[in-house]
Amino acid sequence: MSNAPALDIRGLSAKVADEETSILKSLDLALNPGEIHAIMGPNGSGKSTLAKVLAGHPGYQVTGGEALYLGQSLLDMEPDERALAGVFMAFQYPVEIPGVSIANFLRTALQARLGRGEELDLFDFQDQLLEAMKLLEVDPSFAERPVNDGFSGGEKKRNEILQMAVLKPSLAILDETDSGLDIDALQVVSNGVNTLHKENPEMTILLITHYQRLLDYIKPDFVHVMVDGKIVRTGGPELALELEKQGYVNWKPSS
Amino acid sequence: MPESKLVDNLDLDNYKYGFVDSESHVYRTKPGLDESIVREISRQKEEPDWMLQFRLKALKIYESKPMPTWGGDLSDLEATLDEIYFYVKPQEQTERSWEDVPDKIKNTFERLGIPEAEQKSLAGVGAQYESEMVYHSLKEEWASKGVIFDSIEDGLKNHPELFKEHFGKVIPIADNKFSALNAAVWSGGSFVYIPKGVHLDTPLQAYFRVNQEKMGQFERTLIIVEEGAHATYVEGCTAPVYSTDSFHSGVIEIVVKKDARFRYTTIQNWSNNMYNLVTQRAVVQENATMEWLDGNLGSKLTMKYPSCYLVGKGAHGSIMSIAYAGPGQHQDTGGKVVHAAENTTSSIISKSISKEDGRSTYRGLCKVHEGAKGSRSNVECDALLINDTSRTDTYPYIEVDEKQANVGHEATVSKVGDEQLFYLKNRGLSEEEAMGLVVRGFLEPIAKELPLEYAVELNRLIEMEMEGSVG
C-alpha cells in the first residue's frame, strides 16, 4: 500500500448525468504522494468535470475506468466518505450557506472526522482556526461570518484554502482557485497553499487552472495539458510557459 | 432510504414528550359541549354571575359561527369536538409550593425539566395540567414590587376590577369561532400584571401539558404591562401521542401601555394529534414595543397569527415566527399588524420549513388605517422545502388606507440545494448533518432570539427530524 500512488486514474470516462455526450474520455493520470500537478487546458476541455467526478458530484456519471486513491477505489465512495478519507476539493464556485458561521461549519466538519462519543477539543480547534486565518490574512471576525454569504470572489477563495488549512487533506484538488482573484489575493492564497504543502510535504495537490499565472506562485512538479477529455501532453513547469506563449490553439483535436 | 425508516424514525417515536401518565383527575365533565357543561365549569370555579353570563353568551356566539374554511382542514374537527372532554380538573387548587403538587403531576413536570428551569433563571413559573394551573409561583423579589403572576382564576378572584377592565376587551368574544369557544369554556392560563416602571430582568414562564386522551385545553391569559414596564413571558406546550385527536385553543390578551416593552415567546411542541387553534393579540400604546416570538414545531394543524394593534403614536410591533411542518402536519401561521396611529412601525419575519408531505402556510395581514401617517411596516417570509412533496403557500394581505405610509413585503421559497449538500459533504458531513446545518442556518436569525434552553431544544429537534430526511 505504501507504494500506491496518491491518485491513480485509469481510463476514466464520465458524462453529465442526464446527457449523452462524454466529457472525460478514457483519461489517465497518476500522482505520487507529495507531488504537485497542474492540469491546464482550454475552456470546455473537461478540467472541472474531472475535479467534480473525483469529489463525487452527483451531477456526473462515470461511464468507465477507475480512480484509485492510495489504492482504494474512490469512485465507490460517497462524497463525504471521500472527504473523511482525506480528499478535499476547493470549489471553483464556493456555495453559500446562509446563517451558518465558518467556525460552526468547520467545527461540524472536524467533529465528523472523530469517532462516535469523541468530542472535539474546542481550544485546539480555536487555535487551529486562528492560525489558518492568520495564514490567509483574514481578520479573526471572518470565522463568524456565514459561509460564503455575501463574500467577494476573493473572500470565497480565501475561505476555500482556509478550510483546507483546517481540514488538512492528504489529497487537495484546487479547481480554478485563481479565477476571480486579484494579484494580491492570488499571492495570499498561493502562499497559503505553499505553506500548507511545506508543513505537510506528503500532501498531494492537483491544481486545475486555465492560466499560467497561478504557476508563478505555486510551482508544480508536473504540468498536464488536457484537451477534449484527455491528457494530451505531460511535462515540467516549462510546459506551462510554452502554453502561455502559444495558447491552446495547437492542441485542438483534429476532428 | 426506505420509506419505512422515515416512518419509524420520525415524529412519533422520537417525540420525547409523548409519554403518558395514568389519568388522575378529581373531576371532569362528560364528553362534548352544551350549556350544562359551561354552567358546570363556572360552578366548579365559583365564579361571579357576570362571568357565567359572559360564558353563556360566548357559547351562543360559538354555536352561531360556521367552521372557518379559509385556513387549514377542519373537516374532522366537528366530530372530534363531540368526543373530547372540555374540562378536566386535575387537583383541587393551584399550589404555591412545588412540594404540594401531587406526585404524579410533579413527576410529569420534572420529566419536562420544569422545576430545574425555575431555580435557574426565571422570575416566576406556572404549570398547567389538563384544565387547571396546578402550580404558580413568583419570586418574592418581584411580588414585593407589585408584580402579579397568578392563575387566571386567582386573577379573577383576587383582582376583580383590574380583571374585568381588560378581560375580553383585547379579543372580543365574537372575534372568531375559536375565541368564542374559548370564552365559553376557558380554564387555566395566567393573569399577569407588571406595575408602572418595573423591569423584570428574567422571564416569567408557563408550561402547558395535556395528559388526558381526547382532551380539550382552553387556557386564557391576560397580561397587563403598565407604563414604562419591561417583561418577558415564555410558554411551552407538550402532550402525549394518542391515536385520537386532541384540541387546544387558547386566547392570549395583552395590553402594553405607554413606553412599556413586552415579549411573548411560545414554543409549542404539541404531539401530532393536536389541533392547535390559538388567538393571540396585543394592544400596543404610545411608544410601547410588543414582540411576539412564535415557534410552532408540533401539532397536527396549527392556525395562529399573533397580532399587534398599534394604537398609540410611535408604537412598535414585531412578530418573528418559525414553523416546522413535518409529515402529516400543517402549520398555518403568520401574523397580523394593524397600524392605527402615527409613526407606528412593525416588522414580521416568518420562516417555515416543510418536510415530506408537511405543509406550511404563511398568512399575514398588514393594515394601515387612514391617518396613521409616517407608519412603516416590513414583512419578510421565507420558506424552505426539504423534499419535492413538501408544500408551502403564502397569503400576504396588505391594506393601506394612508398615503404617507411605507409597507414592504418580501417572500422567498428555497429548496435545500443539491450544490449546498454536495459542498458540505465534500467537507465530510453526512447527508443528514449537511441537511441539519442548512436548516439550522435558515432558522438562525430567529433561533438566536430564543431563550437558551429553547434554542438547544430547537436544534435537537431539527437534528432528529433531519434523520432520514433525504431519500
Image (tube, rainbow, N blue to C red):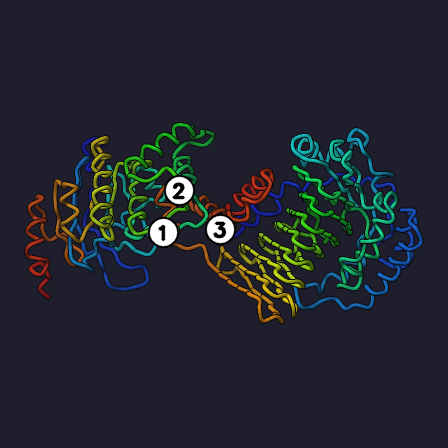
Quarter containing the C terminus of chain A? bottom left
| Along the viewing direction, whichever of B268 and A253 lies nearer the viewer | B268
Give the CA separation, mark 2 to mark 3.
Answer: 15 Å
Question: Is B237 placed above or below B396 here?
Answer: above
**Mark 3 residue type:** Phe
Give the CA separation, mark 1 to mark 2.
Answer: 12 Å
Q: Position of residue B92 (x, y in %)?
A: 87, 39
Near mark 1 (Cα within 10 A), the count class, few <14, some 14-19 or many ≥20, is some
Residue wearing tag 2: A102
Q: Position of residue A37 (x, y in %)?
A: 16, 43
| Pointer 1 chain | A
Question: Is B91 placed above or below B354 here?
Answer: above
Residue wearing tag 3: B442
Give the CA separation, mark 3 to mark 1.
Answer: 15 Å
Earlier in the chain: of badge 1 and badge 2, it is 1
Q: Is residue B334 left or right of residue B150?
A: left
Q: Is residue A126 left or right of residue B459?
A: left
Quarter containing the N terminus of chain A? top left
Q: Residue at x 91, y 51 (%)?
A: B40
Q: Element type at marker 2? A: helix
Q: Element type at marker 1? A: loop
* Marker disc for residue A95: 1
| Along the viewing direction, whichever of B105 and A99 lies nearer the viewer | A99
| Pointer 2 chain | A
Q: Are marks 2 and 3 on the same chain?
A: no
Near mark 3 (Cα within 10 A), the count class, few <14, some 14-19 or many ≥20, is many
